[in-house]
Amino acid sequence: MLILQIPSELTTFDERLSYAECVREKLRREHNAMGAKFRDGKLSQAEWDQYRNEVFAPRNYATTDAILSVRNEVKSDARELPDDSPAMTRISISDVFCESEA
């Protein structure tokens, strides 16, 4: 199983999540470039399928797993906050939502 290696010097949730999201964006761009090669006839159907199944899909799953892992850490930290903590007392559920203008 492939995993995304997040550099150890990235220690905060923000840094780690940003890194994983940047990897996802680079992967998306690579996928689009390979798709363009396929559309332009520079890759055969077999080569395109092999790329999608053997290269893109495992990397995409690993990146998604890394993003979800970082997000779950944030959720775990939030769930452990007591109701009277400063972070929780700043939030009033009735005040944080508004109707969309769209």
Image (cartoon, rainbow, N blue to C red):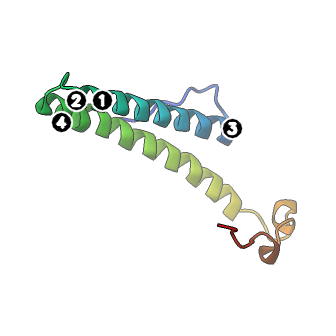
- Could you say where residue 4 lies in the image, as x and y percent from the top left? 44, 33
Residue at 75%, 63% (x, y): give it: 81
- Could you say where residue 23 lies in the image, as x and y percent from the top left? 49, 32
Q: Earlier in the sequence, mark 3 or mark 2?
A: 3
Circle 4 packing at 10 Å, graded few (<14), some (14-19), many (20+), is some
Question: In the image, what residue type sits under mark 4?
Answer: Asp
Marks 4 and 1 close (CB-CB < 8 Å): no
For numbered disc 3, what is the local secondary structure? Answer: loop
Q: Is residue 67 above or below residue 76?
A: above
Name the residue that disc number 1 marks: 36
Q: Earlier in the sequence, mark 3 or mark 1?
A: 3
Q: What mark, if any, has residue 38 been given in the picture?
A: 2
Q: Earlier in the sequence, mark 4 or mark 1?
A: 1
Residue at 66%, 33% (x, y): give it: 11
Residue at 44%, 45% (x, y): give it: 64
Q: CA distance from mark 3 to mark 1?
A: 36 Å
- Could you say where residue 83 lies in the image, as x and y percent from the top left? 80, 71
Marks 3 and 2 close (CB-CB < 8 Å): no
User: In the rendered image, which quarter is residue 50 located in?
Assistant: top left
User: In the rendered image, which quarter is residue 55 located in?
Assistant: top left
Q: Is residue 78 above or below residue 7?
A: below
